[in-house]
Image (cartoon, rainbow, N blue to C red):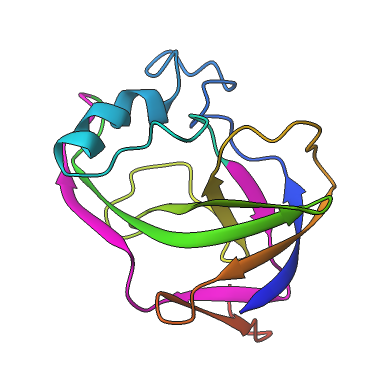
């Protein structure tokens, strides 16, 4: 499914912009070797996420490309599970391949996201900034996007 999305500001923890003293170089840099040990190599991606608001859509997990269980990557929080989904992002006539990065809400300790926000791992995209409109394509077999109902949080 393809939807329009807007680049928005995230918590800044994945990249290290938030200057969280627990993760001075970002959570993704801290998680990298643990993901690699479980078979997921993120070396082709920038170690920060692009946050996209897909409103009025929300996501529903179907079958992730990768599901990493019980990743004990930090001394500050309990082990977490992580979902990863294939994604294509089109920006200014160029299409980029990447992954949707999603800590499992059931095991996530902090920095929660709204249900209309997706975090993407992609190569560095020159010129991309907050407020830019992009086209997002997700695999219908991995994730379902549905219009958010008024009673959903």
Screen quadrant of the N terminus: bottom right
Where is residue 67 shown, x and y percent of the image? 25, 59
Q: Is residue 135 above or below residue 56?
A: above
Q: What count of labels does the image hold? A: 0
Q: Nearer the viewer, residue 135 or 9?
A: 135
Where is residue 72 shown, x and y percent of the image? 16, 36
For the point 63% across and 40% down, the residue is: 10
Where is residue 80 shown, x and y percent of the image? 24, 46
Q: Is residue 131 above or below residue 90?
A: above
Q: Nearer the viewer, residue 141 or 104?
A: 141
For the point 20% across and 33% down, the residue is: 34
Q: Is residue 85 above or below residue 109?
A: below
Where is residue 115 shown, x and y percent of the image? 56, 66
For the point 85% across and 46% down, the residue is: 131
Q: Nearer the viewer, residue 6 or 2?
A: 2
Look at the image and give the residue range highlighted in magenta: 50-75
148 relative position to 111: left or right: right
Is 128 one of the magenta-colored residues?
A: no
Is 73 one of the magenta-colored residues?
A: yes
For the point 58% across and 30% down, the residue is: 12
Screen quadrant of the C terminus: bottom right
Find residue 150 and report its image quarter.
Answer: bottom right
134 relative position to 144: left or right: right
6 relative position to 102: left or right: right
Find residue 134 and report its image quarter.
Answer: bottom right
């Amino acid at each position: 499914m393809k939807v329009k999305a807007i680049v928005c500001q995230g918590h800044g923890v994945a990249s290290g912009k938030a200057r969280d003293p627990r993760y001075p170089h970002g959570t993704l840099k801290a998680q990298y070797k643990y993901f690699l040990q479980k078979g997921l190599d993120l070396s082709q991606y920038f170690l920060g996420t692009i946050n996209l608001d897909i409103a009025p859509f929300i996501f529903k997990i179907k079958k992730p490309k990768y599901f990493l269980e019980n990743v004990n990557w930090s001394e500050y929080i309990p082990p977490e599970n992580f979902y990863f989904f294939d994604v294509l992002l089109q920006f200014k006539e160029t299409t980029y391949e990447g992954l949707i990065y999603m800590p499992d809400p059931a095991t996530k300790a902090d920095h929660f996201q709204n249900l209309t926000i997706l975090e993407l791992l992609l190569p560095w995209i020159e010129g991309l900034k907050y407020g830019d409109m992009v086209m997002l394509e997700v695999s219908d077999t991995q994730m379902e996007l549905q219009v958010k109902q008024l009673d959903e949080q």
